[in-house]
Image (cartoon, rainbow, N blue to C red):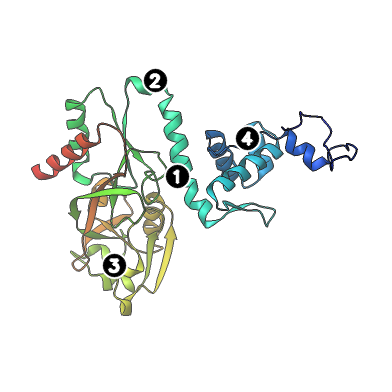
Amino acid sequence: MSNPEGAETAGEPGSPSRPASPAAARAAEAPAPTRAVELRHLRAFLAVADEGNVTRAAAHLGLTQPAVSRTLAALERHLGIRLVDRSTHHLALTPEGVAFRDKATAAVAAFDEALDTGRLRHWPLRLGHAWSAFGPYTTPLLRSWQERYPATPLELLRIDDRTAGLTRGEVDAALLRGPVEAPGLVTEVLFTEARVAAVTADGPLAARTSLRLADLADGPVVLNTVSGTTTPALWPPEARPAATVTVANTDDWLTAIAAGRGNGVSAASTAAMHPHPGVAYVPLDDAPGVPVLLARRDGPGHPALPKLAALAREIVARG
């Protein structure tokens, strides 16, 4: 049997008792190990990931630094992987930690939402998008949903990342453009959009009735590397843009083009959803179309997701 806390530790048979070592005393005071991962483990890991520092994470959680360190270590032991690189003063996530952060965020968000009694009465369906939503079908979708399912609000949320918050659990479904390589998602192509060039409104290309990709390659091309779909690979290898300017969202993309820092390429609905006095949209004759996808996580989700998919298909079919 284990000795009670504070008891002396027996030595060899027949030898006198001796006080417990500091390490043994700490082990006796520590809670019994558990094989289950609890919500506190995920919250501790996410706090460390956000703060990049165990001390600040502990302050955020209202815990001591040793408690957070022990909780994080217990999570890593359970998973059998190292989540945080502790070799530097500023903690950094390992590649496995980066991948696990999205899953932990989704799990914690789902738990917190499940306990939100206000949302239980009218459980909204959150539909994310990175830009341009459902293009020309956006307003018909929102109006038709309100008419048919008034008890389930449809929240359209713009979130500037490649999956519009879907992999992080911030939305229930997302309208995405272009190929999506994030694991754990189920996607359905709803329609395909033509591409357009976005050029500086008072520049020489704005007066053209149409353009080709080669017309944009001589000058800088502005790329939204966070949520956009255009990359230098859109051009043939021998005709890639001479230079690129990178931004993180649609607003900055438009601002850079209007300021004359370069031109861009986007889906046709961007012209209608994001008009800008400093930007002219011109059809591109030789660029492939952009598939518009409805995406959801693979697994149980909001019960109204099948209705959303059916309505989206219906609206596209109506044209």
Image quarter (top left, top right, bottom left or bottom right) of the N terminus = top right
In the depicted view, which residue is nearer to us: 34 or 202? 34
Q: Are marks 3 and 1 in contact (CB under 8 Å)?
A: no
Q: Nearer the viewer, mark 2 or mark 3?
A: 2
| Callout 4 secondary element | helix
Q: Residue tagged by mark 3?
A: 204
Indicate the position of residue 154 as horizontal and vertical percent values.
28, 31
Q: Residue furthest left?
A: 318
In the depicted view, which residue is nearer to us: 264 or 152? 152
Question: What whole-number distance in Å separates the C-alpha atoms at marks 4 and 2?
Answer: 26 Å
Name the amino acid, label 1.
Lys
Q: Residue tagged by mark 4?
A: 60
| Callout 1 secondary element | helix
Mark 3 or mark 1, which has the lower sequence index? 1
Name the amino acid, label 4.
His
Q: Residue tagged by mark 1?
A: 103
Q: Nearer the viewer, mark 4 or mark 1?
A: 1
Q: Residue tagged by mark 2?
A: 118
Question: What whole-number distance in Å separates the C-alpha atoms at marks 3 and 1?
Answer: 48 Å
Q: Is residue 237 left or right of residue 249?
A: left
Q: Is residue 88 left or right of residue 115?
A: right
Which residue is pictured at 34% across the width and 47% down the height?
130
Mark 2 or mark 3, which has the lower sequence index? 2
Which residue is pictured at 29% across the width and 75% down the height?
236
